[in-house]
Amino acid sequence: MKKTFFLIPLFGLFFAANVAAIELPDFTELAEKQGAAVVNISTTQTNKGASVFPGMPNIPEDDPMFDFFRRFIPQQPHGQGGPSPREFESKSLGSGFIVSDDGYILTNAHVVDAADEITVKLTDKREFRAKVIGADRKTDVALIKIEATGLPKVVQGDPNKLKVGEWVVAIGSPFGFDNTVTAGIVSAKGRSLPQENFVPFIQTDVAINPGNSGGPLFNLKGEVVGINSQIYSRTGGFMGLSFAIPIDVATEISNQLKATGKISRGRIGVVIQEVTKDLAESFGLTKPVGALVASVEKGSPADKAGVEASDVILKFDGKTVTTSSDLPRIVGATKAGSKVAIEVWRKNATKTLNVTVGEMPSEDKAPGKKDKRGKAPEKANRIGLVLSELSAEQKKQFEVDNGLLVEDVQTGAAGRAGLRRGDVILGINNQDVQSAEQFNQLLEKFDKGRHIALLVKRGDSTTFITLKLNGEK
């Protein structure tokens, strides 16, 4: 630490003050050594559909203005003033990092999701086609592979040893600018985000922008401690809140993907909620901790173990449940078939129950999972959609009287046309749809090469999306 002398005026006289000057860290060596293991990932996807902006020229989807017009200009169906169908290629950019010298690369699942072609570019300008070994949407982790040997690779660190306030560095390709280095500090650890139940995020103030997704977060030792995944923003750009997936979570996922191509998670079959201060007081708890069981699925592992609604789960397999968001992560990381102890708070006393952990259906088994009414959705249909019927609650949520929820979009015409998970299909060729079975029966009546129009509700807007039936029948 260097010492600096300042002259300080006092009552008209100047005194020399010995002040220790704090040196900022030097990131140059880290950037030089670790930058070669960080890659640029570009993907392409061919879509077929109509140009959706009336009175406007066709705008490529990789153009930043496309998203602006998509949000603010109403879309019009073909035949009602809308342009004729077209085929277009969408592109996206992301980052990744090499974890083994034989070409395995970690990135985000959303970077490679639904990609027809994945290109990996190294810092030495070599380019490779990559294949997806596996991806897990719940944690947003994907493992991809290129055919190469002798590659530079990263060294894994321990995110549990990170301290709030510690310096961290990100390397990635924001907006396509390869090997961009940004730095900041750890703002918080173990962050829970809405709809993200399986990741205790590392929050930082490192500048992260579109294209950084999937890139590494390093500590000052040059060890990877996380995968930069998402930001919180009201503008679409960086606002000082970035979130990274801890590398130990990502490694556990990638090991499973490499071994089996899928993820196995434990489940016990409970619906939980946060324990507030008022709830803790009403249940006789000294402080708001644990996960409150709102309901128990009939016949589930929890039901068989004797877990009841209004129980507060305090420990699972010896691990403390501090907040409700802790429980899904702990249970999910438990091997199916394991017999574990659950400590619950019931009627002003603790009680220990023993449960045999079940297995959560993986995403590749999506056709077998249950919707909110406990009914299994249909398998992927002719155009590549996995659909489920809307419950009464969902109809109220989406403000519709009928429709089908898109649970998954697999290879097929629907993916090429731009349909997404979470879309609600209201009709096909001006005919309302009431059930997945009816929808699939209607599909079977159309010949190869025929164009069909789907009425789709997405967010607050409703639009027609056209697609061409190829050889899927």
Image: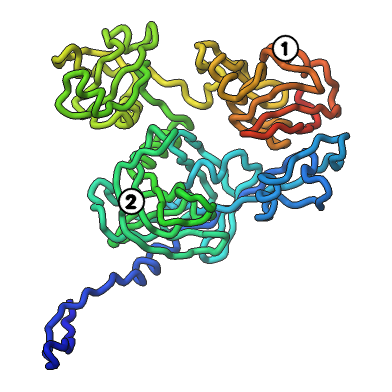
If you read the primary sequence from the N terminus, does the residue marked by circle 2 or circle 1 appear first? 2
- Quarter holding the C terminus is top right
User: What residue did someone put label 1 on?
Assistant: 438
Residue drawn at x 24%, y 19% as measured from the top left: 312
Numbered badge on residue 36: none
Q: Position of residue 435 (x, y in %)?
A: 67, 13
Q: Looking at this view, is 457 or 284 the one in front? A: 284
Q: CA distance from mark 2 to mark 1?
A: 49 Å
The crowding category of the residue bearing disc 2, from other C-alpha atoms within 10 Å (few below 14, some 14 to 19, many at least 20), is: many
SS class of the residue under badge 2? strand
In the rendered view, tell whether residue 132 sits above or below residue 218. Answer: above
Residue drawn at x 78%, y 15% as measured from the top left: 442
In the rendered view, tell whether residue 108 sits above or below residue 463. Answer: below
Q: Is residue 70 visible?
A: yes
In the rendered view, tell whether residue 436 sits above or below residue 260. Answer: above
Q: Nearer the viewer, mark 2 or mark 1?
A: 1
Q: Position of residue 233 (x, y in %)?
A: 48, 50
Q: Position of residue 90 (x, y in %)?
A: 69, 47
Numbered badge on residue 225: 2
Q: Are marks 2 and 1 in contact (CB under 8 Å)?
A: no
Which colouring convention does the figure follow? rainbow
Q: Amino acid at mark 2?
A: Val
